[in-house]
Image: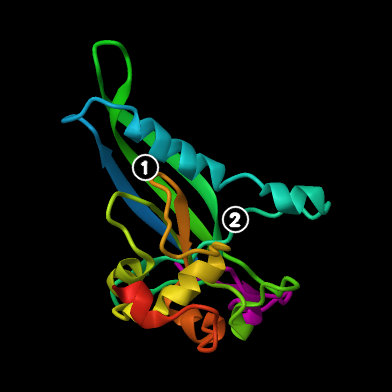
Amino acid sequence: TKAAAWKRTPAKGAKSAGPPEYQGPQPSKLTVEMFFDASDTHDTSVVKAVERLFACCVPTDETRQQQRSSPPWVVFHWGGLTGFPGYVSQVQVKYTLFTTSGVPVRAVCQVTMEEISGETPGQNPTSGALHARRVHRVQTGDTLAHLAWREYGDPTAWRVIAEANDIDDPMRLTNGRELLLPALDELDRLRHPDGPYDDDTVGR
């Protein structure tokens, strides 16, 4: 949704309302419905997914420590559709299926994201300082080159992942480790062609 603020000044004795005066834009809002289902595994993955959404509604630890409480910033991507930089302002969850022990295994979530207005130091969306990032949990057989090819279509972009995660030895990845995968539009800023590694070695 997108709206603007308008104001009408009533005129005494007039036969009709006065013309609307533009007061400024309202923040854009985007609401998406998310469906989580673990009815085949009966594990706690639905509960964990919902907890992650709830966590987006509270200030981050970093901003709390700096006395500038701010929620995590998010950007919605779906194919060619890219939303605005914003924050999760509301999460509504309805659990629809439970195990015999009472564990929720199915949920429908309404997630509302609201546009971030103004500029925050170091996170100005127009300057390119804000980017959406994805988290990948390392599995057996994963390499940085393979992850770069799967994420960006370019195996030589492995340096970006290495630098984003402070990886000194790209050939040693620990199973279960969570890696931050920078957004595609962040590659040009983070790439360092003269880095300390050799692309051909990592590719093999």
Magenta includes 188?
A: no
2 and 1 marks in contact (CB < 8 Å): no
Amino acid under disc 1: Cys
Q: Earlier in the sequence, mark 2 or mark 1?
A: 2
Horizontal and vertical percent for residue 90? 52, 47
Q: Where is residue 134, by image quadrant?
A: bottom left
Q: Main secondary structure of the magenta part?
A: loop
Q: Nearer the viewer, mark 2 or mark 1?
A: 2
- Return the residue at label 1: 109
Q: Is residue 81 visible?
A: no
Does residue 164 sit above or below 175 in this rendering?
below
Q: Residue at x 64, y 81 (%)?
A: 22
- Return the residue at label 2: 72
Residue bounds of the magenta highlight: 1-28
Horizontal and vertical percent for residue 129? 62, 77
Magenta includes 21?
A: yes
Q: Residue at x 43, y 49 (%)?
A: 174
Crowding around mark 1 (Cα neighbors within 10 Å: few <14, some 14 to 19, many 20+) is some
Quadrant where the N terminus is found in the figure: bottom left
Q: Secondary structure at mark 1?
A: strand
Q: Where is residue 79, by image quadrant?
A: bottom left
Crowding around mark 2 (Cα neighbors within 10 Å: few <14, some 14 to 19, many 20+) is some
Report, in whole angstroms, how far the alpha carbon at label 2 lies from the one at label 1: 18 Å
Horizontal and vertical percent for residue 162? 50, 68
Horizontal and vertical percent for residue 87? 56, 58
Q: Residue at x 43, y 57 (%)?
A: 172
